[in-house]
Image (cartoon, coloured by chain):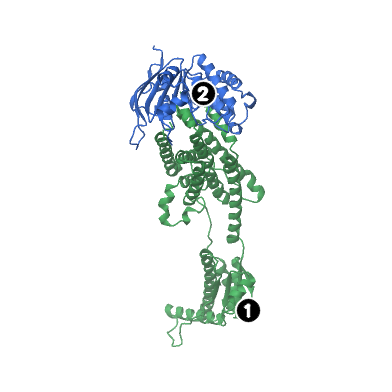
Chain colours: A green, B blue
Amino acid sequence: MYKFTASITKELRLLSRDRVGLMIMFAMPILLVLLITSIQISAFELVNNSKVKVLLCNKDKGKGSQEFLSYLNEVGRFDLVNIDMTDRNVGDQMNDHDAFVALYIPEGFSEQIAKKASYSADKALVEFGINEVSDTLRMVNVDSLTIYFHPVLQQSLRRSIQGALKSVVQLVESKSMLNALYFSINNKPMPASFEKELFNNQIGIREKTTSHNGSRTIPNAAQHNVPAWTIFAMFFMVISLGGNVVKEKLSGSFVRLKILPTNFIIGLLSKQLLYLLVAMSQVLVIFSMGVFLFPHIGLPALNIPHDWLALIVVSLICGMSAISYALCIGVFAKTQEQANGFGAISVVILATIGGILVPSFAMPKSFQFFMNLSPLHWCLEAYYGLFLEGGKLSDLTSSVLPLIASIIVLQTIALIGLKRKNLI
Amino acid sequence: MSNLALSVNNLSFRYAGQAKDCVHDLSFEIFVGERFGLFGPNGAGKTTLMSLMVGLLKVKEGKILLLDKDLATEKKAIKHFIGYVPQDFAFYPELSPVENLDFFGAWSGLDKRTVKERTASLLEVLGLTDVAHKPVKQFSGGMKRRVNLAIGVIHEPQVLFLDEPTVGVDVQTRHAIIDYLKVLNAQGTTLVYTSHHLKEAEDLCERVALIDRGEMVAYDHLDQLLQRHGDNSGLEDLFLKLTGSAYRD
């Protein structure tokens, strides 16, 4: 037992003197999780909560365009700024007004809408067999609205704006057509109360987020970022643990230990146990920050999953995965610079393909295979299962089993490496 | 039980990918309580031989017996009574001498109280008490050598292998280390020692083996060896006479 406690004490002493390693394992992820969550919250608010400034040039003075603009205002997503512009100077106007979208309503838009509605109503009456076919019944083409986008505007946002405009145009068109139809049948305008009843009683859409077993954890930026950057922090122990193994190899300590009457497995176990405690401390510190600090600085609080046991087990497995990776790097790196350089770059690459830096659903399909090779991906999947889906341990087998397999493979590779290098 | 501390029989060793043996058909014996010197120019095979004798390299051809135990089959038991002081510093520079000795003492199979007692006594003898709690990385070369030695002897081994234990130290430290080794030997520890300081070797060793290109060139009591080769000017001249004066590395 004394051998084991002496080994743990030695590792603890070495770790406490590795200030750079401690900074990387604790200060860096704390900063990252704060910064990335704040930035994502801002971006989220920009896209979802802020109004989009739209420069409006309305060359039409009729009722149709007024109705169109009134509905557009009701959507609540657009801040309309009236200007006079031409096709030539629209770019300059957008720059001057700091706007990403401009809308041009052509002259005679209302009149054309009314004509189209009248045609549609007459056509409908003919089709219903109420009226006879007339020679004057001709299809009317309405001049298009023109929408200008700044080149930097994302495709998803363009589509969302176009969708909103199309639905408003459709509403105006439908309303005009129904009015024309009513007038054709009843020879009087549609009563305002009936019109209100028709158009204000739309079918609503309820938004719900799915979860396992009815658990109601509300997803937010903290639920994504806190576990993701905790995993990143765990894997960055490659700098400290990988460097520690390289130092032991280079300092000749491994050689001396090899001739002492103690099994080297005790050394490896004590090293891994200490770093597992480090990983758990990282989880505790970063998660506590998400729970207690975030609400005080205007960030959404982290909601801890209900299944505490699953959270502890997943954290332990993620920690072991990070330790096994760091151990492997340490065994095969020839110098500390190699361990630090390769270790850090490889963790960033594995984090990227594993969905820590870029969401995995945003990756091309060809990357799916590489994503599965990253242990960080499986760690993230396991945490997502807990934090976003409210899953239990039994729901996480699809992500936990690959992690356990990767731990076994990495530990075996590290042991083979130590054996081949004649270090154990 | 014989009075042999070490018996090397027809030992040969070749590193993977090399055409020639690094150690070729070596045989010699070292008696219990003896101070034995192993000398040779750079690349002679001294460190390889030392690594084979302490079990760092696996014996593939020949046999090594340590205190009558076969190194190939009883390595685990042998580890308890041998000590090794490697040429390169082999400790944790971030830790203090006390912290290093605490860890290596435990791994040598000692209990906590014994480690504490021996640490205090070793630090006293080797003049490290004042710096007992400072990180070793702040030490001079001589102090680091003494820490390296202390770690190798904390478990009071019966046979102590020393690979150039005084390299890179000043005269004072060298004398202190040699004096301490003599004390250890007087207490019964068999010393197997390599060095480039042949004057120092003359002072310390009773018997020597001279190896060159992996083969035994001379092996006897130091005074008899000098007498036989008609060279009374010392080990250094005999060394040059037997191994030549050309560069070896």
How many numbered circles are shown?
Answer: 2
Determine if residue A26 is in view: yes
Disc 2 marks which amino acid? Glu
Counting from the top left corner in percent of width and height, residue A423 is at 43, 32
Residues A89 and B144: in front is: B144
Question: In the picture provided, is A277 more to the left or to the right than B221?
Answer: right
Residues B145 and B98: in front is: B145
Q: Does residue B124 lie above or below A242 as drawn?
A: above
Q: Does residue B102 lie above or below A51 as drawn?
A: above
Counting from the top left corner in percent of width and height, residue A205 is at 53, 60
Q: Quadrant of the C terminus of chain A?
A: top left
Q: Does residue A210 lie above or below A130 as drawn?
A: above
Q: Which residue is mark 2?
A: B200
Q: Secondary structure at mark 1?
A: loop
Q: Residue at x 55, y 47 (%)?
A: A229
Determine if residue B65 is in view: no
Q: Chain of mark 1?
A: A
Disc 1 marks which amino acid? Asp
Calculate the distance from the C-alpha at mark 1 to the C-alpha at mark 2: 100 Å
Q: Residue at x 38, y 25 (%)?
A: B217
Residues A406 and B22: in front is: B22
Q: Which residue is mark 1?
A: A84
Q: Quadrant of residue A285?
A: top right
Q: Residue furthest bottom?
A: A135
